[in-house]
Image (spheres, rainbow, N blue to C red):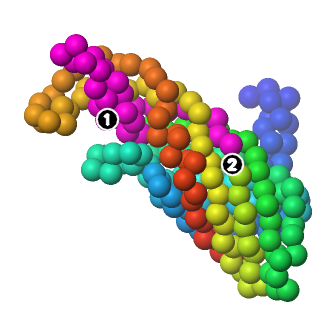
């Protein structure tokens, strides 16, 4: 390894260690909504900005199907801290994000001169927009309510099971809009332990 590469690698490792060991508040917990159940991590950058990372199961519209897995990252800005209660702290926040995963989604195919929607697993990539409200108790607990729609693409594997007959159909891979992302308009709830 070249000396410059060693210096760059050591600098990057020290920067990552400094960020993760920083005294900024952090929180871990769960986030659940209409289509997903996630392990959730929140890290304050400063008093007005924080990042949120979620990893979990995504079942979308197909509750009887095979749940997929999805990872999401958002960078949030706290734009108001109303003093609605004597104890604890409120925060109104919003921010952009990204998501990637292997999930079940609706895929339209033409069969018997009619277009039908089938559920099929495949890769998704999307941008997200999050808007929420959180309450930080005077003990180490955070409750949050947010909406986070995803706007992206879904690339299925093309191997479908007919929901009526149960027979296997091979339509071929197809790229389309990630329909399950619209379930993000239904509010999700997060409960996190702050440390």
| Quadrant of the snapshot with the N terminus | top right
Give 115 or 39, whichever is nearer the viewer.
Answer: 115
**Which badge, 1 or 2, comes first in the chain's sequence?**
1
Q: Is there any visible trace of residue 19 in the rendered image? A: no
Q: Which residue extends farthest top?
A: 113
**Image point (29%, 21%), residue name:** 115
**Image point (62%, 48%), residue name:** 148
- Which element is circle 2 on? strand
Total numbered badges shown on the rendered structure: 2
Task: Please identify the quarter of the rendering in which residue 155 is found.
Answer: top left
In the picture of the structure, the residue carrying the numbered disc 2 is 130
Q: Is residue 186 left or right of residue 132?
A: left
Look at the image and give the residue range highlighted in magenta.
103-129
Q: Position of residue 36 (x, y in %)?
A: 47, 54
- Which element is circle 1 on? strand
Q: Position of residue 133 (x, y in %)?
A: 73, 63
- Assess disc 2: are there few (<14), some (14-19) or many (≥20) residues with their C-alpha within 10 Å of its C-alpha: some
In the picture of the structure, the residue carrying the numbered disc 1 is 119
Placement of 9 over or under 38, stated as above or below: above
Q: Is residue 106 left or right of residue 170?
A: right
Check whether the beta carbons of the residues at disc 1 and disc 2 lie within 8 A of each other: no
Placement of 15 over or under 161, stated as above or below: below
Q: Position of residue 60 (x, y in %)?
A: 42, 46
Q: Which residue extends farthest front?
A: 114
| Quadrant of the snapshot with the C terminus | bottom right
């Amino acid at each position: 390894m070249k000396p410059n590469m060693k210096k760059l690698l050591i600098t990057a490792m020290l920067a990552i260690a400094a960020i993760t060991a920083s005294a900024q508040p952090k929180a871990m917990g769960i986030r659940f909504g209409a289509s997903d159940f996630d392990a959730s991590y929140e890290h304050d950058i400063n008093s007005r900005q924080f990042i949120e990372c979620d990893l979990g199961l995504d079942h979308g519209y197909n509750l009887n199907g095979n749940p997929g897995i999805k990872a999401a990252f958002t960078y949030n800005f706290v734009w108001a801290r109303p003093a609605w209660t004597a104890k604890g702290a409120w925060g109104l926040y919003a921010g952009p994000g990204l998501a990637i995963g292997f999930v079940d989604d609706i895929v339209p195919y033409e069969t018997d001169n009619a277009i039908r929607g089938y559920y099929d697993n495949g890769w998704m990539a999307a941008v997200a927009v999050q808007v929420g409200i959180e309450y930080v108790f005077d003990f180490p607990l955070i409750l949050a309510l947010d909406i986070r729609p995803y706007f992206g693409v879904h690339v299925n594997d093309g191997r479908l099971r007919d929901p009526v007959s149960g027979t296997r159909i091979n339509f071929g891979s197809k790229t389309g809009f990630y329909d399950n992302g619209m379930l993000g308009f239904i509010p999700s709830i997060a409960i996190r332990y702050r440390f």
